Amino acid sequence: MLFLILGCSLFGCMDSGQRKPILQNPALLADDNNFKINTLEPETIHVNKDVAIRNYFKWMDSVVATHNSNHSYQIDEYILVHNNPWIIDTLAHTDYYYMMEKGIFNEDSQALFALRKGQLINIPDSLQTINIKQRIANTYLDINIPEFKMRIIENGKPIYKFPIRVGQNGKRYLAMANREVDMRTKPGIGTIIRVNKNPIFINPKDNHKYQTTRRDDGKVTKLPAIPWLEPTINGQSLGQLIHPTTNLETLEKAYSNGCIGLREADAWVVYYYAPLGTKVFLRYDLTGKNEAGEAIQFENIYPGFENRTIQKEVLETALQAIDGKPIPVCDCHL
């Protein structure tokens, strides 16, 4: 089986419930019949036609631009989606394996609908916008390499935990780097410096570009359109991208060329919680806690890395909240 080892760009490069119906108001802002904005409070967006994933980001950019040109406060895609979290759920449920569990085979996830005609999207007011910005600013990604887990930490508390894959323990010549590369995922502290909404899928071993991928069940599909995130690590760009994998069998394994891989559903969630500037903490801790809170030991997948752990005090100093106070680092086992 051909597992897709996504490019990693080593040296280049997921029912909000009852909502108010739109009011009949003549003062509506329209954008080529794709949506209408109700200008009475509370403001809502009425989706006028189905929006496929391949057109989703362009649609979102248009909505944000229209709002920001007509209001005294500014929003972005992240703020809009956090005010309408059901959008993340919709995107997450386009995951190939989630759909297969429902008995649905889909060959092209980009053709699936992110938004449907008739749906309403709530626009946050200025106070809601400030609150969402504060939450996002007080959020970071916590990755424990030997545990094969990524957590999203918001205001010092874990709100999500996802299985991941990390780099293999070894070296390999990569045509993309034109040299032998240490494939181990490196620990350290950094920030998201790039969000790639249109990634190119490349095998770094031979620079072969992929248009399709073979799934764990042997079926071939087109590639997903889920953004890739690039963090710095200790001030350097190491090419350790955070991106989806199309093969769940590789999760919780040292399998990649250094990148952090997630299932597609989880990658959508991470994307909306990690905009540019989000802090990323990659640690190599061999001890942790299970769901019962009991101490457990993880396999030392990179012998010699056990001395590279970063002390809690250093992390708290690095993770400064918008009010200047350190974001608390919880001793949690979610």
Image: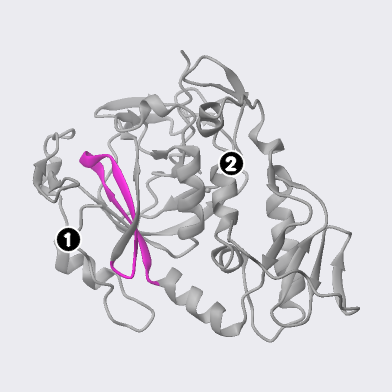
**Residue 149 forms part of the magenta stretch:** yes
Q: Residue at x 22, y 66 (%)?
A: 329
Residue span colored magenta: 138-156
The residue closer to the viewer here, 318 or 23, is 23
Near-viewer residue (307 or 197): 197
Badge 1 vs badge 2, beta-carbon distance below 8 Å: no
In the rendered structure, the answer to whether residue 258 lies left or right of residue 316 reads right
Counting labels gives 2
Task: Choose between 19 and 74: the one closer to the eye.
Answer: 19
Residue type, mark 2 in image: Pro
Disc ID at residue 199: 2
Determine the CA span between mark 1 and mark 2. Answer: 35 Å
Q: Nearer the viewer, mark 1 or mark 2?
A: 1
**Mark 1, secondary structure of its residue:** loop
Q: Quadrant of residue 78?
A: bottom right
Q: Quadrant of residue 66?
A: bottom right
Q: Residues within 10 Å of mark 1 (few under 14, many from 20)?
A: few
- At a point 21% along the width and 53% down the height, the residue shown is 333
Residue 231 sits above or below residue 26 on the image: above
Which residue is at the front of the view, 185 or 3? 3
Circle number at residue 331: 1
| Left-right relation of 75 to 47 | left
Measuring 73% from the left and 57% from the top, which residue is drawn there?
Answer: 119
Q: Position of residue 222 (x, y in %)?
A: 63, 27
Q: Earlier in the sequence, mark 1 or mark 2?
A: 2
For image coordinates 49% across by 29% down, the residue present is 246
